[in-house]
Amino acid sequence: MTAFPIPTLTGTDQLQLESVALSDIAAQFGTPTYVYSRKALTDAYRAYETALAGRKAMICYAVKANSNLGILDAFARLGAGFDIVSGGELQRVIAAGGDPAKVVFSGVGKTEAEMRLALEAGIGCFNIESPEELVRLGETAATMGKVAPIAFRVNPDVDPKTHPYISTGLKANKFGVAYDDALSLYRRAAQTPGIAIHGIASHIGSQLLDAAPVAEAAERVLALVEQINDAGIELHHIDIGGGMGIRYEDESAPHADAFLAPVLEVLKDRPEAIHLEPGRSLVGNAGLLLTRVEFLKHGEEKHFAIVDAAMNDLARPALYDAYHAVVEVEKSDVTADVYDVVGPICESGDFLARDRKLAVRAGDLLAILSAGAYGMTMASNYNTRPRAAEVMVDGDRCHPIRARERVEDLFANEQRLP
Ligand code: LLP
């Protein structure tokens, strides 16, 4: 590895995030612990701001990537908006001091209760994904005496060339309304009481390393915007979704400037504000998972470093066969060997990394990199494992932003039979 994917991670003998040694964090908070760099997420946000300079724009952080209140707070203070997919995420945004007026609500299955909550809070836009949802939202808003701001999430049928589980803009996906139906849906929405048309949205997938499909989607959306305008309907914003990829291994991940340039070129003559919904690219390489080696086990065919983090903490390797770099936190003089880094869970799929050359002993710390996005938010309690602690490093300080769960928390809402 030439450089760490996490830009604020430094050190060779002793890894540091910003100015804090990871071993100090482990000593203070235990392991496994998710550790984030405030500087890294701030820099990532600023890169989008710079790329959008001179354009009317809103960066709506995709909360699903990492919904910790400390993370949301950091983005709220930077002036971010938020992309949410549930009433729960909205409540987090509000609890973290986010501005509901800057919230866009995506998702194919919004319940009436979630719609009510969002209308009550006064969110900025509902991204509507079906005609049925339009009806439900119009009726809900009307009974509350409110008007719901909407955009249709249009499926541009563009192949984003990413993992099939995280591509969302193809005809075969469940997301968005069909491109060919969009114009008539706008006409219908314009006549629907309780609905105010604000914009148009599209999101084609995640971990995109190439900007071309996003620009292609923007072109398709633009053609539609022109037809919508011709029908006498004005839009305030064009939401081009999230999806910019990051470097996990040796990918050449785009910079916000390079990623957005082709899209901005397509939309350069448009008066509408541009909305973005980035998640991974804001937090993925701002975070790592700190874990301790419990045992080294030498099997017949493979060597295993059995660590105290597992697939319940970081599901991506088990779920997508995703690669996360693993590095030793403190340099030692032991001979390196090739290990599978595995957790204690009773599944063969419980691995965090495979075939990695590591110089480790039992008791040593490892950092699983690029774990800031879709790490903690996808964690579970499988095997009755309390979820990890989370810590935010800020310069030479570190703030606990989530206490480690306790086992008694896990069954606090359960009961024995009467
Ligand atoms: N907007 C919408 C409507 C989305 O569905 C998503 C992600 C985003 C924005 C943010 O995309 P990002 O900028 O983070 O790529 N669990 C998977 C990723 C699932 C992404 C789902 N949608 C993973 O761990 O790779």
Image (spheres, rainbow, N blue to C red):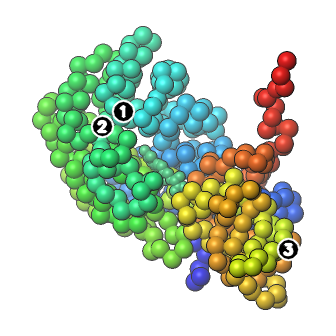
Point out the residue furthest to the front here: 300
- In this view, the mark in front (1 or 2): 2
Amino acid type at image mark 3: Ala
Which secondary structure, mark 1? strand
Location of residue 63 in the rendering, given as x and y in whole percent from the top left corner: 55, 45
Label at residue 128: 1
Label at residue 177: 2
Disc on the earlier residue, 1 or 2: 1
Q: Is residue 109 above or below residue 7?
A: above
Residue that badge 3 annotates: 362
Amino acid type at image mark 1: Ile
Q: Counting other residues with Cα less than 10 Å from the Cα at mark 1, is it few (<14), some (14-19), or many (20 or more)?
A: many
Location of residue 72 in the rendering, given as x and y in whole percent from the top left corner: 60, 45
Circles 1, 2 touching at the beta carbon (< 8 Å): yes
- The C terminus is located in which quarter? top right
Which secondary structure, mark 2? strand
Disc on the earlier residue, 2 or 3: 2
Label at residue 91: none
Which secondary structure, mark 3? loop
Q: Counting other residues with Cα less than 10 Å from the Cα at mark 2, is it few (<14), some (14-19), or many (20 or more)?
A: many
Residue 263 or 366: which is nearer the viewer? 366
How far, Cα to Cα, is label 3 from label 1?
Answer: 52 Å
